[in-house]
Image: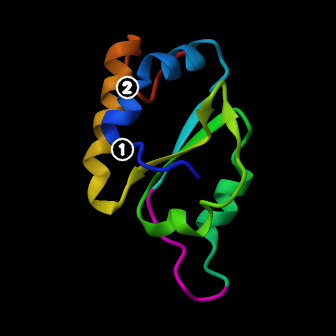
Amino acid sequence: MTVGFARNAVLGVADKVIEAVKGKAIRHFFLVAGCDGAKPGRNYYTEFVEKVPQDCVVLTLACGKFRFFDKKLGDIGGIPRLLDVGQCNDAYSAIQIASAWQMRSGWESTNSRSR
């Protein structure tokens, strides 16, 4: 997993991400902001990430990423399908990324972009 994307790095490629969305190469973003836990059987987030469709990107917050950071999820047009935004306390960065993508793209809101 390529790490260190945080807010500034992700926003540095915002135009590329927006073009991939507009070109329908990226269909959806999922934010995984939790941890599977240490006990056997607590692997919800790992299973979820493994099932995310190939045309979708996963943004991660929290230490849960360490359960699936070694998965080979590939990329979409050079954009890694697994983008690490940071730890739990970086939730503000995830909000700033979504807001910036919305403003730069002209989408009405982050929940109602045209498909």
Secondary structure under the numbered disc 2 in the rendered image: helix
Residue shown at 35% from the left, 14% from the top: 104
| Alpha carbon separation for disc pair 1 and 2 | 10 Å
The residue where tag 1 is placed is: 6
Does residue 103 appear left or right of residue 5 in this picture?
left
Does residue 77 appear left or right of residue 87 in this picture?
right
Rendered location of residue 74, percent (x, y): 71, 41
Quadrant where the C terminus is found in the figure? top right
Rendered location of residue 28, percent (x, y): 59, 33
On screen, 67 above or below 98?
Answer: below
Which numbered circle lies on residue 76? none
On screen, 108 above or below 41?
Answer: above
Q: Which residues are magenta?
A: 33-40
Q: Alpha-carbon neighbours of circle 1 within 10 Å: few (<14), some, or many (≥20)?
A: many
Does residue 45 appear left or right of residue 9 in this picture?
right
Question: What secondary structure is the stretch in magenta mostly built from?
Answer: loop
Magenta stretch: includes residue 39:
yes
Magenta stretch: includes residue 70:
no
- Amino acid at dot 2: Gly
Residue shown at 59% from the left, 64% from the top: 45
Q: Alpha-carbon neighbours of circle 2 within 10 Å: few (<14), some, or many (≥20)?
A: few
On screen, 96 above or below 103?
Answer: below
Residue shown at 65% from the left, 61% from the top: 70
